[in-house]
Image (spheres, grey):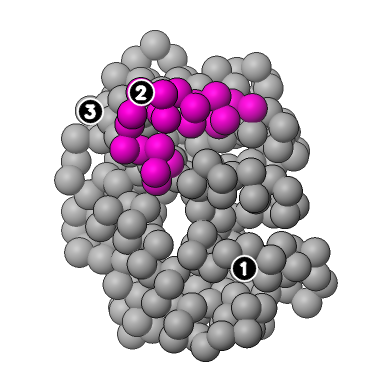
Amino acid sequence: MDRNEVLKRSKDAGIHRILNPGIDLETSRRAIRLAEAHAQVFAAIGVHPHDALSWNEDTNFHLRKLAEGSKVVAIGEIGLDYYRNRSPHEQQRRVFLEQLALAAELGLPVVIHNRQATQDVLALVSEWHGELVRSGSPLAQRPGVMHSFSDGEDFARQAIEMNFYIGFSGPVTFQNARDLQQVAAALPLDHILVETDAPFLTPHPHRGQRNEPAYVHYVVEKIAALHQITYSKTAEITTASAARLFAW
């Protein structure tokens, strides 16, 4: 594999922090090992909705132990996916709720995956965030990010009201993504994060190829153009937001 070359290209592109999320216990362990081997890499740990059926009575315990690692900065990628339907919806919701509770217990923000499940994601997250507020948890001020956002402005603004960040990845650069670009342009820049979702969702002009962290600069360029400000200012603001969210 060319992982070292990928990381070198990211450094050369001026990227100093990379969040690498797990999608199950094994990939979460691998994310931690990679983070421990490279200073610029950090880990998120969790069970993706596609893998919700892998959850058993021991999974929560193992995630809690993994979270003790110093390079673990978030719980994710977690959430709901009603598009692929690789796990029953009720099982997805149960696993999502368990991991939201774990994040609250550990004081770690969440990286949320949502595909065609907006109403259920909003309902579950609103209840969770409300409990954070009622309990006085500092996590209520930086609860997480709506990862690789593909929904509408209304949902985005409701998430921002709960102090979530909205993450935009390669699709915002696509020439036919006018609706998504309008959402990105309408949102406050200080609640936007830039992402790659590598190796997927490669931005234009490399669409169709394997994605990698160095390509995040195309997302920054598009967000800067949509907000009609400079690339450097966009990079500065989104970098500061990521640092605030992940405390790195």
Residue 245 higher or lower than 18, as above or below: above
Q: For mark 1, give the secondary structure.
A: helix
The residue pinned by badge 1 equals: 170
Q: Residue at x 78, y 77 (%)?
A: 175
Instruction: Decide which of 247, 75 is in the foreground and name it.
Output: 247
Label located before the other in sequence (3 or 1):
3
Q: Is residue 157 left or right of residue 247?
A: right
Q: From the image, which quarter does the C terminus lie in?
A: bottom left
Residue 128 higher or lower than 177, as above or below: above
In whole angstroms, how far apart are the C-alphas of marks 2 and 1?
A: 37 Å
Label located before the other in sequence (3 or 2):
3
What main secondary structure does the magenta stretch of the protein show? helix
In whole angstroms, how far apart are the C-alphas of marks 3 and 2?
A: 24 Å
The residue pinned by badge 2 equals: 135
Q: Is residue 234 left or right of residue 180?
A: left
Q: Badge 3 local density, few (<14 within 10 Å), some, or many (20+)?
A: few
Q: Residue at x 50, y 36 (%)?
A: 78
Q: Inspect the image, locate mark 2, and give the three-letter code of the amino acid beneath it.
A: Ser
The quadrant in which residue 226 appears is bottom right
Residue 220 seen in the current view: yes
Q: Inspect the image, locate mark 3, and give the three-letter code of the amino acid beneath it.
A: Lys
Instruction: Decide which of 66, 181 is in the foreground and name it.
Output: 181
Q: Badge 2 local density, few (<14 within 10 Å), some, or many (20+)?
A: few
Q: Looking at the rendered structure, which numbered label has been put on residue 216?
A: none
Q: From the image, which quarter does the N terminus lie in?
A: bottom left
Per the rendered image, the range of residues in magenta is 123-143
Let me know if residue 93 is in the magenta part.
no
Label located before the other in sequence (2 or 1):
2
Residue 22 seen in the current view: no
The quadrant in which residue 109 appears is top left
The residue pinned by badge 3 equals: 65
